[in-house]
Image (cartoon, grey):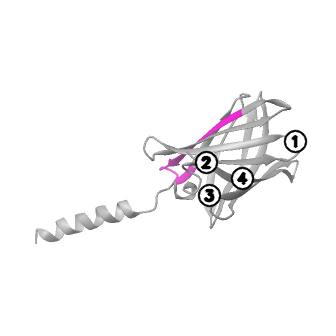
């Protein structure tokens, strides 16, 4: 009889560790750098994703480089909010702006629901979708809210350029 509780405990521990990580939607990005060209001569956007503190969080460090402006830098930290059972992020950037929101996944698409970007006392509502395109690319579609309408901010094809 003592063997049964021990076996049950081992089964429970094995099942718990085999459960999917809340960061699974970001797995194809993590450990790699990606680059895409922003429309309108805005420059090249490079994102590098890494797991930090073991695999407790995912960090995305990015830089937009163009001859027409100084480098624009930003960083997102993705984290699992165990209270709300949601994948969340905090984004900060070199011009002093920030945003925070949630991240959902549907099939091969990361969905960033509408949230507010704030800088210098002003806000802008935006949303984004990142759709996986094969093993080495993804498509980004970012829209901004103008009144009651959504307008295209940019669409970018991101390609894997390196392992991190």
Identify residue for label 1.
41
Q: Nearer the viewer, mark 4 or mark 2?
A: 2
Q: Distance between the residues labelled 1 and 4?
A: 16 Å
Callouts 2 and 1 close, C-beta under 8 Å: no
**Left or right position of 21 against 136:** left
Nearer the camera: disc 2 or disc 3 = 2
For image coordinates 61% across by 48% down, the residue present is 162
Disc 3 crowd, CA 10 A, few/some/many (<14, 14-19, 20+): some
Q: Is residue 79 left or right of residue 17?
A: right
Using the rendered view, name the quadrant where residue 19 is placed: bottom left
**Mark closest to the chain's N terminus, 1 or 3:** 1
Q: Earlier in the sequence, mark 1 or mark 4?
A: 1
Residue named by callout 3 = 104
Q: Which of marks 4 and 3 is nearer the N terminus?
A: 3
Q: Is residue 80 magenta?
A: yes
Q: Nearer the viewer, mark 4 or mark 3?
A: 4
**Side (left or right) of 164 relative to 153:** left
- The nearer-to-camera label among 1 and 3 is 1
- The CA distance from mark 2 to mark 3 is 26 Å
In the image, the segment drawn in magenta is: 73-87
Question: Between marks 2 and 1, how big is the CA–CA gap?
Answer: 23 Å
């Amino acid at each position: 009889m003592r063997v049964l509780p021990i076996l049950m405990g081992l089964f429970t521990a094995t099942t718990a560790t085999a459960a999917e990580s809340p960061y699974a939607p970001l797995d194809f990005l993590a450990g790699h750098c990606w680059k895409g060209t922003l429309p309108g001569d805005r420059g090249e956007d490079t994102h590098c994703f890494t797991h930090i503190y073991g695999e407790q969080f995912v960090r995305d460090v990015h830089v937009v480089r163009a001859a027409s402006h100084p480098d624009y830098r930003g960083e997102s930290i993705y984290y699992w909010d165990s209270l709300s059972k949601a994948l969340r992020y905090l984004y900060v950037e070199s011009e002093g702006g920030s945003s925070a929101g949630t991240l959902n996944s549907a099939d091969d698409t990361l969905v960033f629901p509408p949230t507010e970007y704030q800088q210098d006392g002003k806000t802008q509502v935006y949303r984004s979708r990142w759709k996986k395109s094969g093993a080495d690319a993804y498509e980004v579609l970012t829209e901004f809210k103008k009144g009651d309408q959504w307008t295209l901010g940019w669409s970018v094809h991101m390609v894997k350029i390196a392992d991190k």
